[in-house]
Amino acid sequence: MSLRPDPTGPKRTQSRGRTQSRAGALLAALAAAVLLAGAARSAPAQAAESRAAAPRVQAHRVQTHRVQTHRMQTQQAAMAPAAASQEGPSDLGDAAANGDAPGLDEIVVRIQPSPEVGGDTFTLGEVAEFDGFDVAGAAALAKLSLGRSPSPGRSMALSEPLVRSRLAGLGQSDRVRLVVPRNAQVTRASQTVAAAEIEELVRAQALKDAGGDSASVKQEVLTPLNDLLFPKGAVEWQVEPVGKHLVPGGDRSYQVVAHVDGKEVWRMPVRVRQKVYQTIVVAKRPIRRDQTIGSDDIATVRRPVNASQEAGYTGNPSAIVGMKAKRPIAQDEPISEAIVRVPAAVSEGGRVQVVFETNLLLMEAPGVALVAGQIGQFIPVRNLETGKVVYGVVQSDERVKVN
């Protein structure tokens, strides 16, 4: 059998190849279209899914916040009894102790645990804080007087009954919620004045009155003094002597008065003992009565003059030398002009010349002095020629003028 080529073979093969190529292109185009359609559909789906998930996330956050809030409220409720036990009772019990916010017409008055006041009396505004919407009512409560303050530097209890008794007169107790801490105390502000400061004031005034200096005047405050507590303010002092002091030294009394901001807060008499040292004349040895005092009989020493107040003293030796002692003077005894006298120009029983003298006449006669006399002294004299007693003034030694 012979084989003969088919004249239509090559043409059929080429036609089949072209058909397969077109089918592959179609399949590729279809696949691309499917992919593009899938991508177009995925974007809206993802957006829709995100929008659907957002409420779920928000709901989760809200639920978490509610859980945290519930935990905080539980902790505060557990701590409330401890806080209430630290504060005193009030009108509304635990609610007031916890400091709940006031109502529209309510005023919360919270007393401070340890307030300090300055005046003789104190008000509610000085010891409390106010909370509420009624500003005018709180201002009126702040002016309410709670009574006298304690003494400077001292404290007193600030109890709830005390405050309520003052609030009762206002007629607004139903609008006031009072919170008073347990053991609250109000203290009066003060300043301390040392006893040494008061002593120094008295010493300075006594030294000025004595007219000396600290080297010649020694002082001792006899009145016991303590540190003082004065109210706050400017302190002024007055130191006035009590009575008159005629001689230096000895004991002196002074009235001491203190003022704070012009108001007297303290007064007290204070006694001071002074020793004034001066140079005085004393007897070096015993001196007899009527003895003429020489410079060898005396000495000058420095000693407290108050020790010789009764006898007196002098610091001038020339006023003593040449004088006669009126009485015996002991050794080391202070000598004053009061215990010496000027020596007599004529002695008792001594011979004198009696003189009578005018502008035209001069007469003299012998006589006898009946008493001792000093120059210028008026003494009796007996005229030896007539025997009569006449009176005259001692002119000089042995001369007595009778006219």
Image: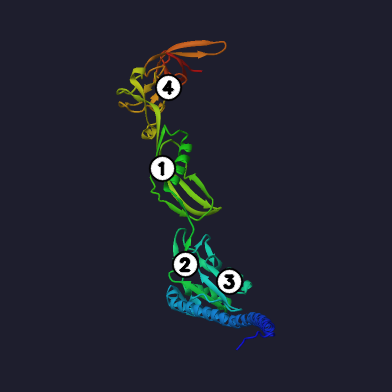
Q: Report, in whole angstroms, how far the alpha carbon at label 4 lies from the one at label 3.
A: 82 Å
Q: Report, in whole angstroms, how far the alpha carbon at label 3 lies from the one at label 1.
A: 52 Å
Residue 319 is tagged as 4
**Mark 4, other Cα within 10 Å: few <14 / some 14–19 / many ≥20:** few
Callout 4: helix, strand or loop?
helix
Q: Which badge, 3 or 2, is on the more N-terminal residue?
A: 2
**Mark 1, other Cα within 10 Å: few <14 / some 14–19 / many ≥20:** some
Task: Inspect the image, locate mark 1, and give the three-letter code of the amino acid beneath it.
Answer: Val
Residue under label 3, please give it: 141
Q: Report, in whole angstroms, how far the alpha carbon at label 4 lies from the one at label 2.
A: 78 Å
Of the residues tagged 4 and 3, which is closer to the observer? 3
Q: Which badge, 4 or 3, is on the more N-terminal residue?
A: 3
Of the residues tagged 1 and 4, which is closer to the observer? 1
Task: Kindly indicate the quadrant of the structure image that contains residue 345.
Answer: top left
- Residue 119 image offset from top left, x and y in percent: 53, 60
- Residue 402 image offset from top left, x and y in percent: 48, 17
Task: Inspect the image, locate mark 4, and give the three-letter code of the amino acid beneath it.
Answer: Ala
Q: Report, in whole angstroms, how far the alpha carbon at label 1 lies from the one at label 2.
A: 46 Å
**Mark 3, other Cα within 10 Å: few <14 / some 14–19 / many ≥20:** many
The answer to whether the residue labelled 1 contacts the one labelled 4, judged by CB atoms less than 8 Å apart, is no
Q: Which badge, 4 or 2, is on the more N-terminal residue?
A: 2
**Mark 2, other Cα within 10 Å: few <14 / some 14–19 / many ≥20:** some
Residue 272 is tagged as 1
Instruction: Give the tally of numbered discs.
Output: 4
Horizontal side of residue 400 vs 307, given as left or right: right
